[in-house]
Amino acid sequence: MTQVTVREKHQITLPMAIVRAARIRANDVLVASYQNGVITLATAGAEPAKRKSVMDYAGIAKDMYGKDVDEVHAYLARERASWE
């Protein structure tokens, strides 16, 4: 059994062997629980959440600032005028 040290801000570093075996990557979300003196960490859900690519956000702001180029430019002009 591997020991880890709890640091001042309640942080621990997982041993690399465990990280690799569990396929944990940076920014993965783990679920922590405590029961009968045992702390358990598990990946959130049955499998880690699918990582989003930048293309998953394509079109997210469609029509938010205008329906065509002229409307977008007019919106930007109003915003810039409000800065003064």
Image: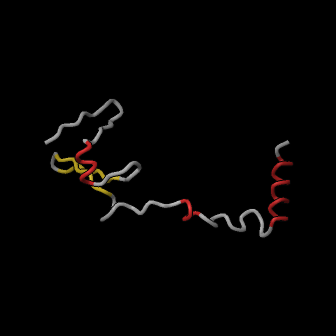
The quadrant the C terminus occupies is top right
Asked whether 73 or 45 is in front, the reply is 73
**Quarter of the image holding residue 9?**
top left
Residue at position x 54%, y 65% from top? 56
Query: Which residue ends up furthest to the bottom in the rendered image?
Result: 67
Horizontal relation, residue 3 to residue 63: left or right: left
Does residue 46 sit above or below 80 in this rendering? below
**Horizontal and vertical percent position of residue 11:** 33, 37
**Horizontal and vertical percent position of residue 13:** 29, 39
**Quarter of the image holding residue 46?**
bottom left
Residue at position x 51%, y 60% from top? 53
Q: How is the image coloured?
A: secondary structure
The quadrant the N terminus occupies is top left
Asked whether 72 or 17 is in front, the reply is 17
Query: Which residue ends up furthest to the left in the rendered image?
Result: 1
**Horizontal and vertical percent position of residue 58:** 61, 65
**Horizontal and vertical percent position of residue 81:** 86, 48
Query: Which residue ends up furthest to the top in the rendered image?
Result: 8
Residue at position x 39%, y 48% from top? 26
Residue at position x 64%, y 67% from top? 59
**Quarter of the image holding residue 83?**
top right
Q: How many marks?
A: 0
Asked whether 34 or 25 is in front, the reply is 25
